[in-house]
Image (tube, rainbow, N blue to C red):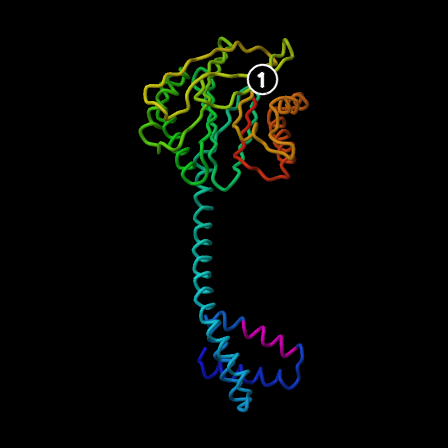
């Protein structure tokens, strides 16, 4: 907008307001301010404009009043610099937020696990990030013998670095199909990848197992991951599905012990990340026994209904604000 036009319009509006003092005149001023913002007119330019118009309309303006306006102009010059810097930072933040949204969508597309469709296991999974980018990951593979491998991993860290690290783990797993039948060997291979490629300040926990329906056995190993649960239908009892092993990335020469469970009809395997067991309420962290109680209340339902209901209960206890990435997986046999 040309300065002379700007000056004329502002002078007309101010003159009209001085005469009538009406709300309509104030509203016109508000509308005009929006146009000035669109034209990138700075706050100090508005004050300078106001002073010039007052000189035109009230040439005998009191000297003290004029001095106060000059002081306001100096104040607004500093304010204008700070305001423009704030606008620039806000624009950069909006751009960064947009880029993070795109990266989060790409991550979800890349890491989204496909649940095997089979008639001998009912599988339910829920994985929710606490923020836009997730540091949790789950992975299923069914081979030609109907053996199902499953992995649940958790990055010790959050945000974009954790998400990038998890993507690397996903593709490392995809490149090691020949070791699907060996949970310990799988973790050892991944450990070497992490130790060589991931910053020493970041660690990854992982539980990896495989179920062989031909012999009804579940073989598994753990790299410092949160223990899962095993439900035995014969004894109607929940036990910890624990395994010892160092987190991935600590030492290149780490080995991982394999464990074996014989699985019967009606049994369940529950795997999770620490975002489940470390749910914090007003009373403190939730106990693992409380999670078992939630699963027991829902165990007559399908596996997916179980994880959905447990997630809802835990989310409700936290006032629907996750403090950590949440992954819960149930396998019903």
Q: Residue furthest front?
A: 64
Residue 116 screen position, x and y as percent: 50, 24
**In front here: 207 or 60?**
60
Q: Residue at x 47, y 57 (%)?
A: 90
- Give the magenta part as a residue range: 24-33
Reading the image, the residue beneath label 1 is 268
Q: Residue at x 42, y 40 (%)?
A: 160
Quadrant that contains the N terminus: bottom left
Residue 167 screen position, x and y as percent: 40, 34
Q: Residue at x 49, y 15 (%)?
A: 211
Q: Residues within 10 Å of mark 1 (few under 14, many from 20)?
A: many
Residue 305 screen position, x and y as percent: 63, 28
**In front here: 101 or 180?**
101
Q: Residue at x 52, y 20 (%)?
A: 227
273 is within the stretch colored magenta: no
Q: Residue furthest left?
A: 196
Relative horizontal placement of residue 11, taking residue 93 as reference (left or right): right
Quadrant that contains the C terminus: top right
Picture mark count: 1
**In front here: 74 or 294?**
74
Q: Main secondary structure of the magenta part?
A: helix
Residue 85 screen position, x and y as percent: 43, 62
31 is within the stretch colored magenta: yes
Q: On screen, 268 above or below 326?
A: above
Relative horizontal placement of residue 298, taking residue 113 as reference (left or right): right
Relative horizontal placement of residue 51, taking residue 280 as reference (left or right): left
Q: Secondary structure at mark 1?
A: strand
Q: On screen, 243 above or below 306?
A: above
């Amino acid at each position: 907008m040309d300065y002379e036009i700007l000056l004329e319009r502002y002078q007309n509006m101010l003159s009209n307001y001085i005469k009538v003092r009406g709300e309509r005149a104030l509203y016109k001023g508000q509308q005009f301010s929006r146009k000035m913002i669109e034209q990138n007119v700075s706050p100090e330019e508005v004050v300078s404009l106001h002073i010039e118009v007052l000189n035109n309309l009230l040439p005998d303006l009191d000297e003290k009043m004029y001095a106060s306006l000059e002081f306001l102009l100096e104040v607004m010059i500093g304010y204008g610099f700070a305001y423009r810097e704030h606008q620039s930072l806000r624009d950069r933040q909006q751009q960064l937020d947009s880029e993070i949204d795109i990266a989060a969508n790409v991550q979800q597309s890349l890491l989204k696990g496909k649940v095997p469709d089979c008639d001998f296991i009912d599988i339910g999974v829920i994985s929710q990030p606490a923020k836009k980018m997730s540091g949790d990951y789950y992975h299923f593979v069914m081979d030609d013998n109907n053996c199902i491998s499953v992995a649940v991993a958790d990055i010790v860290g959050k945000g974009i670095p954790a998400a990038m690290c998890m993507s690397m783990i996903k593709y490392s797993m995809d490149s090691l199909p020949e070791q699907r039948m060996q949970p310990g060997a799988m973790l050892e291979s991944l450990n070497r990848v992490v130790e060589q490629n991931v910053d020493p300040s970041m660690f990854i926990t992982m539980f990896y197992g495989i179920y062989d329906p031909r012999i009804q056995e579940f073989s598994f190993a753990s790299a410092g991951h949160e223990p899962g649960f095993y439900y035995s239908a014969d004894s109607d009892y929940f036990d910890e599905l624990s395994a010892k092993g160092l987190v991935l990335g600590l030492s290149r020469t780490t080995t991982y012990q394999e464990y074996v469970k014989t699985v019967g009809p009606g049994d369940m395997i529950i795997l999770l990340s620490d975002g489940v067991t470390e749910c914090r309420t007003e009373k403190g962290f939730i106990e693992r026994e409380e999670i078992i109680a939630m699963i027991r209340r829902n165990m007559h339902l399908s596996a997916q209904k179980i994880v959905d209901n447990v997630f809802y209960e835990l989310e409700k206890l936290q006032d629907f604000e996750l403090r950590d990435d949440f992954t819960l997986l149930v396998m019903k046999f």
